[in-house]
Image (spheres, rainbow, N blue to C red):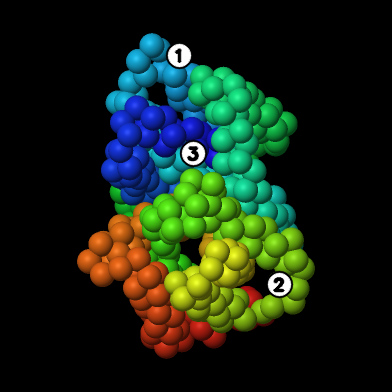
Amino acid sequence: MITAVAVPYQVFRITGSSFAVGLLGLCEIVPILGLAFVGGALADAHDRRRMVLVTELAMSGVSAVLVFNALLPQPQLGVLYAAAAVLAGLDALQTPSLDALLPRLVGRNELTAAGALSELRTTAGMIAGPALGGVLIASIGLPATYLVDVGTFGVGLGMLLLMRAVPPPAGAERPSVRRILEGLRYARSRPELLGTYLVDMNAMFFGMPNALFPAVAARYGGAKILGLLLAAPAVGSFVAVATSGWSNHVRRHGLAVILAAGAWGVAIVGFGLSPNLPLILLCLALAGGADMISGIFRSVIWNQTIPDSLRGRLAGIEMISYSSGPTLGNVEAGAVASAFSLRSSIISGGVLCVLGTAILAFTLPGFRRYDARAG
């Protein structure tokens, strides 16, 4: 998350163009879509701990390249785009193995709590990382900021070396197109899995207005407000996961995902209708909390229902579902705002999110009725 702030900042400093910053997203989505399935197949055929270790080491190497580029008299824009693409590709290769580790490390009755802790890790990074990145850039400069990021990889690598091996399931075959298609067929055959993918993609496509935050911030004070807008959903997510003990008692996980996605849409509508900044921040925090609840129950459904032999390949599908929605949603939000207005883009996105969630709940009864007690 430090790099996620530093790279866009450096691109803008070099070019002075928001469009140039936006191109980073295009550089990232292409390798994610291309390599997530490959990462899933590798996770089911190799030691998952080793996969995470190797990709983590490669990521630290890319961060080192960013250090050297920042030290040049004229840092190269192409290096930043290439680094963004390579980091996204490595993340696509790593995430399926990382996600597939969890069911091998804890018992079934601990999956909800372990999933909440996993979401807490992500949320803490989303709150602290950008704030720390901004402070570091302002105080010690870009080269040293990238160097700090390189150092953080040392912590992760050390922890991975202390872990025991997590070999592939017995009888695992080598990665192949046939193995990838096998995972896709399995996902298509399970309504509870389709529901988790489609409901989240619908919510993120219509109700993810991050691309509009700079324009909203300009109305209320500029750059200093932008940071608050970006942090508000993460703060809501943090509060939700920190108080998520009640989630262990919920058994209708599909219905919980549906209700949380609907609440996300309602909160986004509230964001669009809010007349002042405090209400905007409150609605964004409520949206972030709803998204976190949805994420907890989606991860529990995945970890409880997917066989270990398919876990990596299905984690690749999951990654595409939660990565493509926000990226494409920013494009949708920007296009509607350009054609109509900022407020109409936000409100219509929230309304369509709620309607889309209702339609999916009606058309996927197996997902709506999913009950963890049924096994």
The residue that label 3 is drawn on is: 4
| Displayed quadrant of residue 305 | bottom right
- Determine whether 190 is above or below 5 in the image: below
224 vs 332, left or right, is: right
* Helix, strand or loop status at disc 3: helix
Q: Position of residue 34 (x, y in %)?
A: 32, 45
Three-letter residue code for mark 3: Ala
Three-letter residue code for mark 1: Leu
Residue 305 visible? The answer is no
- Determine whether 38 is above or below 255 in the image: above
65 or 32, which lies in front? Answer: 65
- Residue at point 64% right, 77% down? 372
* Helix, strand or loop status at disc 2: helix
Asked whether disc 1 touches disc 3, contact meaning CB atoms under 8 Å apart, the reply is no
Q: Gap between marks 2 and 1, in whole Å?
A: 48 Å
Question: Which label belongs to residue 71?
Answer: 1
- Residue at point 36% right, 57% down? 330
- Residue at point 53% right, 52% down? 225
The residue that label 2 is drawn on is: 247
Q: Gap between marks 2 and 3, in whole Å?
A: 31 Å
The N terminus: image quadrant: top right
Q: Position of residue 150 (x, y in %)?
A: 57, 24
Tell which circle, 2 or 1, labels the residue nearer the N-terminal end.
Answer: 1
328 or 300, which lies in front? Answer: 328
* Helix, strand or loop status at disc 1: helix
Q: Position of residue 231 (x, y in %)?
A: 58, 53
Three-letter residue code for mark 2: Ser
